[in-house]
């Protein structure tokens, strides 16, 4: 039975007139006009009095007189302000919590990075022959690209250092023998968006069996691609360290060949691959910084694969009047611009059309092939341009050395090995200041060994190119300085650094990761299978 007492509004005294042991519930009409206007008075419970509802800060006149419309609106506005302040405070707290979590993640990553560089392993291990499995896609023997010379020289000098080398690559054009390395071709298929690029997963039972029999000490895979997934799976199956070297900057190519919305998923794939790897090699410092910016992996697991060039094969001594006659279409006395490389839309070769429009007396030669060749030939119809197709061996060396200036307008080069080869051949280079090219021509050498221009800036390009074409003494001075600089870079030294330092770092990271994964298992083993205590008498 309820013990409350209903008091009519007209007889309601001021709340201060009630004795302290009575608790007054504020009338509902102050908040809800449609509710009953009576006051509920009930005896207080034992213990100190508890106010169920806050008393107004200031009360003027009788209680019943404060229920006017204006006071209700004021109270409603005050409540809304309180609610809004509460929501804003909650949002602020959530943002602060997210910021704290982000800072904690960054601190954890910094702590992990501060551990490196890892100490070198026993120096004696460097002298012992290693068994190295290379997964390279597409083939460095058949597919012409920037990393072809890199991997061929890498295999050559690993064999020279006494290592056993197995190369798994796409099946087209695989030679029977290459400096004693074991070669395995994997059935491939053409890339849907770039038909001349063969791809292969390299995860057939035959290849898994061959790699398992080889018992590699380390697996090294080129990335990104399809084969790198197979290499990663085999490395995990065999419990072997894996190194990935990043050669093709696919996120830059995607908008030119397919849909821009695929760029973000591509970065996620790259992150998945390289976070699973024990070490990532990059051909240029600029590319390494970009991978760090996208948090592809921790900074101490990104290492530089030093540049190198075959200074014997690419040498000014190969300059040939006959080759110059061929490249200039029978006008060897005219200024000759040379470009060597894959003819792809991502290379910004249409920029050279604007350059040639301003140089009616110059000639240009394109050495190489690719899916953009037909479009370029149509673009240069009626202009003094020569397309030679693929050249190799001594012919390629002659083509480099017989030009006056080498042009590189591409903004997507991970390094630009053709720039190294041109400079080694003794001809100055005019290249876009983008990608990995500034690693070859740093700011302190710009204008001394070669020239860089702002990407897409035709006026800047012409200000560097025209003086070289018009002044033979300047060309000779710059070309000689470029040759002297390139003589410092040797593939043998670059290979030794990868083998003795970077591979050791990968093995160190792999051992550390394995120890961390085994820690919970070791804890459980100690928990359930405690070692017996030794008793001494």
Image (cartoon, grey):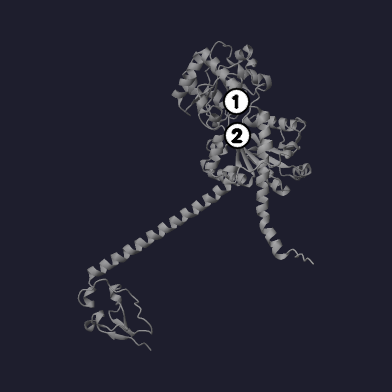
Mark 1 = which residue? 420
Residue farthest to the bottom?
1
**Quarter placement of the N terminus:** bottom left
* Depth check, front residue: 93 or 269: 93
Where is residue 242, by image quadrant?
top right
Q: Is residue 26 above or below residue 232?
A: below
Where is residue 365, by image quadrant?
top right
Q: Residue 400 at x, y = what percent?
A: 61, 20
Q: Residue 72 at x, y = what percent?
A: 26, 69
Instruction: Categorize mark 1 by other alpha carbons within 10 Å: few (<14), some (14-19), many (20+).
Output: many
Q: Is residue 160 rendered to the left or right of residue 271?
A: right
Mark 2 = which residue? 283
Residue farthest to the top?
333
Mark before the other along the chain sequence, 1 or 2 = 2
Query: Quick one: SS at disc 1?
Result: helix
Residue drawn at point x = 45 percent, y = 27 percent: 457
Labels 1 & 2 near each other (Cβ < 8 A) = no
Query: Quick one: SS at disc 2?
Result: loop
Q: Is residue 307 above or below residue 448?
A: below
Q: Is residue 99 above or below residue 432?
A: below
Q: Residue 82, which numbered label?
A: none
**Quarter placement of the C terminus:** bottom right
Q: Residue 327 at x, y = what percent?
A: 59, 16
Q: Residue 353 at x, y = what percent?
A: 50, 23
Residue drawn at point x = 64 percent, y = 45 percent: 278
* Depth check, front residue: 166 or 16: 16
């Amino acid at each position: 039975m309820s013990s409350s007492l209903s008091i009519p509004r007209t007889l309601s005294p001021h709340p201060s007139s009630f004795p302290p042991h009575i608790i007054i519930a504020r009338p509902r009409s102050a908040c809800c006009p449609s509710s009953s206007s009576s006051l509920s008075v009930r005896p207080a419970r034992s213990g100190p009095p508890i106010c169920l509802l806050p008393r107004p800060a200031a009360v003027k006149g009788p209680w019943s007189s404060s229920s006017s419309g204006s006071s209700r609106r004021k109270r409603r506005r005050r409540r809304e302000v309180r609610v809004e302040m509460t929501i804003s405070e909650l949002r602020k707290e959530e943002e602060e919590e997210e910021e704290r979590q982000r800072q904690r993640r960054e601190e954890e990553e910094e702590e992990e990075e501060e551990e490196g560089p890892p100490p070198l392993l026993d120096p004696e291990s460097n002298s012992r022959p290693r068994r190295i499995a290379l997964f390279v896609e597409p083939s460095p023997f058949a597919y012409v690209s920037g990393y072809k010379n890199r991997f061929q020289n890498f295999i050559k000098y690993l064999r020279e250092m006494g290592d056993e080398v197995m190369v798994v690559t796409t099946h087209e054009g695989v030679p029977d023998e290459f400096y004693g390395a074991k070669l395995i071709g994997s059935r491939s298929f053409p890339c849907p968006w770039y038909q001349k690029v063969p791809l292969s997963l390299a995860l057939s039972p035959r290849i898994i069996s061959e790699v398992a029999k080889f018992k590699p000490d380390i697996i090294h895979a080129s990335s990104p691609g399809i084969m790198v997934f197979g290499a990663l799976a085999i490395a995990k199956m065999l419990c072997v360290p894996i190194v990935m070297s990043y050669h093709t900057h696919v996120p830059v190519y995607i908008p030119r060949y397919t849909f821009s919305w695929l760029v973000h998923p591509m970065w996620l794939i790259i992150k998945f691959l390289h976070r699973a790897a024990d070490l990532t090699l990059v051909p240029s410092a600029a590319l390494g910084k970009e991978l760090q910016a996208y948090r592809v992996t921790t900074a101490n697991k990104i290492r530089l694969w030093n540049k190198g060039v075959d200074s014997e094969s690419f040498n000014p001594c190969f300059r040939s009047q006959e080759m110059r006659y061929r490249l200039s279409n029978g006008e060897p006395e005219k200024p000759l611009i040379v470009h060597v490389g894959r003819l792809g839309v991502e290379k910004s070769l249409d920029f050279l059309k604007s350059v040639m429009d301003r140089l009616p007396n110059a000639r240009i030669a394109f050495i190489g092939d690719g899916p953009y060749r037909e479009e370029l030939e149509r673009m240069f119809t009626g202009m003094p341009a020569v397309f030679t197709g693929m050249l190799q061996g001594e012919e390629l060396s002659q083509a480099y050395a017989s030009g006056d200036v080498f042009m590189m307008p591409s903004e997507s080069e991970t390094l630009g090995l053709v720039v190294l080869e041109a400079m080694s051949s003794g001809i100055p280079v005019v290249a876009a200041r983008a990608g990995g090219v500034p690693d070859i021509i740093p700011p302190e050498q710009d204008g001394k060994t070669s020239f860089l221009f702002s990407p897409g800036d035709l006026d800047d390009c012409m200000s560097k190119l025209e003086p070289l074409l018009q002044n033979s003494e300047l060309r000779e001075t710059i070309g000689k300085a470029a040759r002297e600089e390139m003589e410092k870079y040797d593939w043998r030294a670059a290979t030794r650094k990868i083998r003795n330092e970077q591979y050791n770092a990968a093995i160190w990271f792999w051992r550390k990761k394995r120890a961390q994964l085994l820690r919970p298992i070791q804890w459980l083993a100690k928990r359930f299978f405690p070692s017996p205590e030794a008793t001494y008498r």
